Image (cartoon, rainbow, N blue to C red):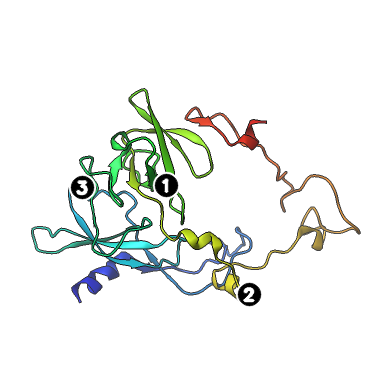
Amino acid sequence: MKNNFLIKYLTFGLKKKSGHNNLGRITVFHKGGGHKKKYRIIDYKRNLYKKLGSVIDIQYDPNRSANIALISYSKDNKGFGILSYIIAPDGLNLGDKVISTKFARIRLGNCLPLFKINSGTLIHNVELYPNNGGIFARAAGTSIIVLRKYNNKYTVVKLPSGVERLINNECKGTIGVVSNIIHKLKKLKKAGNSRWLGNKPVVRGVAMNPIDHPHGGGEGKKSGNRLTPWGKNINRRLKLKNRFILQKYKNNLK
């Protein structure tokens, strides 16, 4: 009962926005409806240092593609255990122990700074700036490969997109691949499944009137540059000015 009471502090209700802003205008298209759900507060920072945690549950999270793990950390001076949610790596089971410290072993679910992680290790939930929380590789089945160390200050990693970039050695990463690997194989059986997820049907620009979209109006098939509803070119080139990115995917090297 005590655990159920404490878990309530890790969740809160989400207000439906349906892609509208504070003025009621649509700012994000193709959103609306969806099943009622609560948000689970995820510990991306893993800042409960030197506390050994135990996995007490693996749960489904409606807000993300990956599963989440409920961790119970060692009790404090008042005798209360600390509960938190983390992104569950694939293979993490009930009763497994996890810890976040630079002295931890390279074991599934443990969180360490990058300078402590060996080359070739698969990690996820990786920070871009120290102590800011993980932002890379949080989706189901994703992972980052640690390639090598660079100038005793950075670590070269390969992101899920294929990009090789430098990340500060003090940034933390969690050992393992994100759970729910078969998520990409899931197929929506009917249109209603997509509506339950909060997606609305997409209307083609050529099926609209000229006032609603640059592609609208006229007769027959149109050719030329694809434009957004505001008349901007869709085929934009990615900028290659970030000095921390060592190699882009092959398509961007042309």
Q: Which residue is mark 2?
A: 190
User: Which is in the foreground here, disc 3 or disc 2?
Assistant: 2
Which residue occupies the foreground of this view, 87 or 186? 186
Q: Is residue 98 left or right of residue 145?
A: left
Q: Amino acid at mark 1?
A: Ile
Up-down: is 3 above or below 106? below
Circles 1 and 2: CB distance less than 8 Å? no
Residue 192 versus residue 40 in the image, above or below: below
Q: Earlier in the sequence, mark 3 or mark 1?
A: 3
- Tell me residue 12's x, y (percent): 36, 68
Residue 10, picture quadrant: bottom left
Of residues 215 and 189, which is closer to you in this image?
Answer: 189
**Distance in Å between CA atoms under marks 3 and 1:** 19 Å
For marks 1 and 2 on the same chain, the one whose residue lies earlier in the sequence: 1
Residue at 50 percent across and 27 percent down: it is 243
Q: Left of 167 or right of it: where is 208?
A: right
Tag 1 residue: 135
Residue 80 pos. (x, y %) = 14, 64
- Furthest residue to the right? 219
Residue at point 34%, 51% (across, down): 44
Gap in angstroms between the C-alphas marked 3 and 2: 46 Å
